[in-house]
Image (cartoon, grey):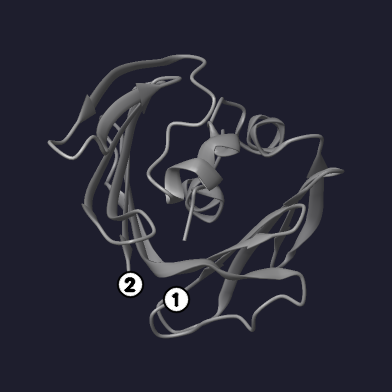
C-alpha cells in the first residue's frame, strides 16, 4: 500500500514557497513560476487522519516544468521534473524514479491515476486537454471555477493576473478521501 507521505510528496502531485524557495532554474522562463503553500489531508475508515503541509515552487521551463515541494521548515521533500524525455521524481532518502510522463510516474509510484499532466494548465486556471473533463463551471468573467477530471474534483478561486490563487483537489479512492489545498502567493 502506498504511504500517505508518498501521496503528499507527489501531490501534485500537484503539486507545491512562502518561507523557503529553491533558486530559479537556469532554464526557467521569466515570469513563469508560482509559489505558495500546500496542505494535504488523507482520511480512511478506522484510521487516524493523516496530514502534511509545506511550501511549493512551480517553474515553467522551455521544455517542461519543475515542482519543488518543501516542508514548512524549508527541507526538500521532493522535486518533480517534467521535460520532453519524461518525468523524474527525486526524494530525499529514496532512489530517483523516472517514467515517460508525470501521470505514468504517479501510476508507477502510487499505483493509481493522478492527472499530473494537467498541472501546467491548472496552475494557469486552464482546462488543457479536455479528455475526461466533466462538470465545468465558470464565473461571470468566463474563468474556470470547478470541474472533474479522472475522479478528481478540482476548484479554482481568487484569480490574479496569472491564474487562480486558491486550488482544491479532492478524490475518493480505495475507501480513502484525499484533499489537497493550494494557496498561491
The residue singled out by tag 1 in the image is: 17
Percent x, y of residue 139: 16, 36
22 relative to 44 in the view: left or right: right
- How far from the left and from the top, in percent, is residue 151? 39, 20
Which of 82/13 is in front?
Answer: 82
In this rendering, position of residue 137 left or right of residue 42: left
Q: Secondary structure at mark 2?
A: loop
Whether residue 124 is visible, yes or no, is: yes
> Measuring 21% from the left and 26% from the top, which residue is drawn there?
137
Q: Nearer the viewer, residue 118 or 46?
A: 118
Element marked by disc 1: loop
> Image point 44% across, 70% down: which residue?
35
Graded by Cα atoms within 10 Å as few (under 14), some (14 to 19) or many (20 or more), the crowding at tag 2 reads: few
**Closest to the observer: 23 or 121?**
121
Taking the view exactly as shown, the residue that stands out farthest to the left is: 140
Residue labelled with disc 2: 185
Q: Is residue 107 above or below residue 135?
A: below
Answer with mark 1 or mark 2, whichever residue precedes in sequence: 1
Residue 168 occupies which quadrant of the picture?
top left
Amino acid at each position: 500500500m502506498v504511504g500517505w507521505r508518498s501521496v503528499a510528496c507527489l501531490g501534485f502531485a500537484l503539486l507545491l514557497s512562502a518561507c523557503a524557495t529553491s533558486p530559479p532554474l537556469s532554464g526557467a522562463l521569466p515570469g513563469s513560476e508560482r509559489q505558495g503553500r500546500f496542505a494535504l489531508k488523507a482520511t480512511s475508515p478506522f484510521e487516524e487522519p493523516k496530514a502534511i503541509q509545506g511550501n511549493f515552487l512551480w517553474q515553467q521551463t522551455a521544455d517542461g516544468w519543475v515542482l519543488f515541494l518543501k516542508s514548512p521548515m524549508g527541507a526538500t521533500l521532493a522535486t518533480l521534473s517534467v521535460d520532453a524525455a519524461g518525468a523524474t521524481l527525486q526524494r530525499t532518502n529514496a532512489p530517483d524514479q523516472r517514467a515517460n510522463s508525470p501521470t505514468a510516474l504517479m501510476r508507477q509510484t502510487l499505483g493509481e491515476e493522478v492527472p499530473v499532466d494537467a498541472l501546467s494548465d491548472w496552475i494557469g486556471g486552464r482546462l488543457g486537454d479536455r479528455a475526461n473533463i466533466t462538470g465545468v463551471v465558470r464565473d461571470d468573467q468566463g474563468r474556470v471555477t470547478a470541474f472533474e477530471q479522472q475522479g478528481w474534483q478540482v476548484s479554482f478561486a481568487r484569480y490574479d493576473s496569472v491564474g487562480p490563487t486558491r486550488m482544491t483537489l479532492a478524490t475518493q479512492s480505495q475507501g480513502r478521501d484525499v484533499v489537497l489545498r493550494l494557496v498561491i502567493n
